[in-house]
């Protein structure tokens, strides 16, 4: 098969389209012909060499996959060849013509969804669902600030927060993204490049601050988040952003005075919850209450270009790779 392989950690431009052995499904796995592979900011972290877990080179990035089952390993449940599925491979392998998925993270793709939409679900929607319900425990009537509302997780979080019945404020980087965020449910949008988001949050909430912040750009925003949060508010750190540094400033005095609760969020730690999370989300998709937003599809060979577009912020929703055109 063809795959985008990384022989050296660093830039996405180290990716090369190469021949690679077809993976074989082991017990509890399914082999999938990849029709679409989702691109996530976490892919950049893995390719940089700064991922906490050791990755073996040559490495094939990509965790989010949608496609057709080719074969199954022992104990693969009711899956069979020809089934249309989506899922998440925790060890990568998605930027390829074929990939292996664990059965417990593989789900039938609803007929109402395209392969590209299926590949846009796993990491963004799982992350947003866990952050909203398990970490923040967002409730109806509360106000939530979703940072980076144009990103994959941001798009998912806006919609899932509206399902809860919350008021949603989101930060975006352009007027066009503000319009797009409003179309998927955001009540208020803040063009952070032109307006101080803290001042605008205080204005929207009459000085109270927001009850919850879902923070995807912690390196840039974390210190300011303490000014935007309400007393006894909750901040969920979903990501650091695309900055090379992972260091940020912690405002101790404000955190103490406001009695802020801070939660870290790393999806691999919630793997045991994924089957239940996915089933809940599938129900919401089938009921039309949430939607996958695919910004653009790229051929497999253009993976580095897609990742550069992600870094540049030229995205609203998800980017996907299409190995078979």
Image (cartoon, helix red, strand yellow):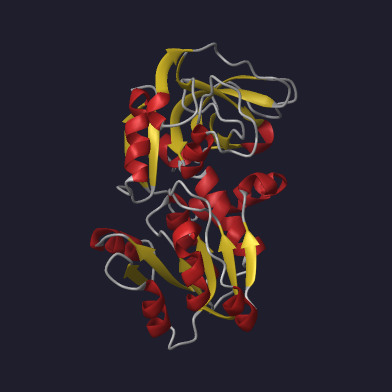
The reply to whether residue 152 is in sight is yes
As drawn, the residue found furthest toward the bottom would be 206
Q: Nearer the viewer, residue 100 or 44?
A: 44
Residue for point 37% across, 28% down: 13
Above/below status of 321 relative to 8: below
Above/below status of 68 relative to 41: above
Q: Which of 35 and 233 is in front in this view?
A: 233
Q: Quadrant of residue 57?
A: top right
Q: Where is residue 221 in the image (x, y as percent from the top left)?
A: 46, 64
Above/below status of 5 relative to 215: above
The reply to whether residue 288 is in sight is no
Q: Which of 179 and 231 is in front in this view?
A: 231
Residue for point 24% across, 59% down: 176
Left or right: residue 104 versus residue 185 is right
Q: Which of 313 and 189 is in front in this view?
A: 313
Q: Position of residue 28 (x, y in %)?
A: 72, 27
Q: How many marks?
A: 0
Q: Position of residue 248 (x, y in %)?
A: 52, 60
Q: Where is residue 172 in the image (x, y as percent from the top left)?
A: 34, 62
Left or right: residue 275 versus residue 128 is right
Q: Quadrant of residue 186?
A: bottom left
Residue for point 27% across, 63% down: 179
């Amino acid at each position: 098969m063809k795959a985008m392989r990384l022989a050296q950690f660093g830039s996405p431009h180290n990716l090369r389209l190469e021949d690679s052995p077809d993976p074989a499904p082991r017990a509890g796995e399914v082999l999938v012909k990849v029709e679409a592979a989702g691109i996530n900011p976490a892919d950049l972290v893995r390719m940089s060499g700064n991922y906490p877990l050791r990755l073996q080179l040559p490495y094939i990035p990509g965790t989010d996959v949608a496609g057709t089952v080719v074969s199954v390993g022992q104990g693969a449940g009711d899956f069979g060849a020809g089934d249309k599925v989506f899922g998440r491979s925790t060890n990568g392998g998605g930027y390829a013509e074929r990939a292996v998925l664990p059965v417990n993270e593989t789900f039938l793709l609803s007929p109402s969804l395209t392969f590209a939409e299926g590949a846009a679900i796993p990491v963004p929607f799982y992350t947003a669902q866990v952050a909203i319900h398990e970490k923040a425990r967002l409730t109806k009537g509360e106000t939530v600030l979703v940072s980076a509302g144009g990103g994959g997780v941001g798009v998912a979080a806006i919609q899932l927060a509206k399902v809860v019945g919350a008021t949603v404020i989101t930060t975006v980087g352009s007027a066009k993204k503000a319009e797009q965020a409003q179309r998927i449910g955001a009540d208020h949008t803040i063009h952070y490049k032109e307006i101080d988001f803290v001042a605008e949050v205080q204005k929207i909430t009459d000085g109270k601050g927001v009850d919850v912040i879902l923070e995807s750009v912690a390196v840039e925003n974390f210190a300011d988040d303490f000014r935007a949060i309400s007393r006894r508010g909750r901040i969920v750190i979903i990501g650091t952003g695309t900055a090379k540094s992972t260091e940020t400033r912690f405002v101790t005095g404000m955190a103490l005075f406001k009695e802020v609760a801070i939660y870290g969020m790393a999806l691999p730690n919630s793997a045991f919850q994924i089957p239940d999370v996915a089933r809940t989300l599938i129900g919401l998709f089938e009921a039309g209450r949430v939607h996958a937003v695919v910004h653009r599809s790229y051929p497999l060979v253009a993976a580095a270009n897609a990742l550069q577009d992600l870094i540049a912020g030229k995205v609203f929703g998800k980017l996907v790779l299409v190995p078979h055109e």
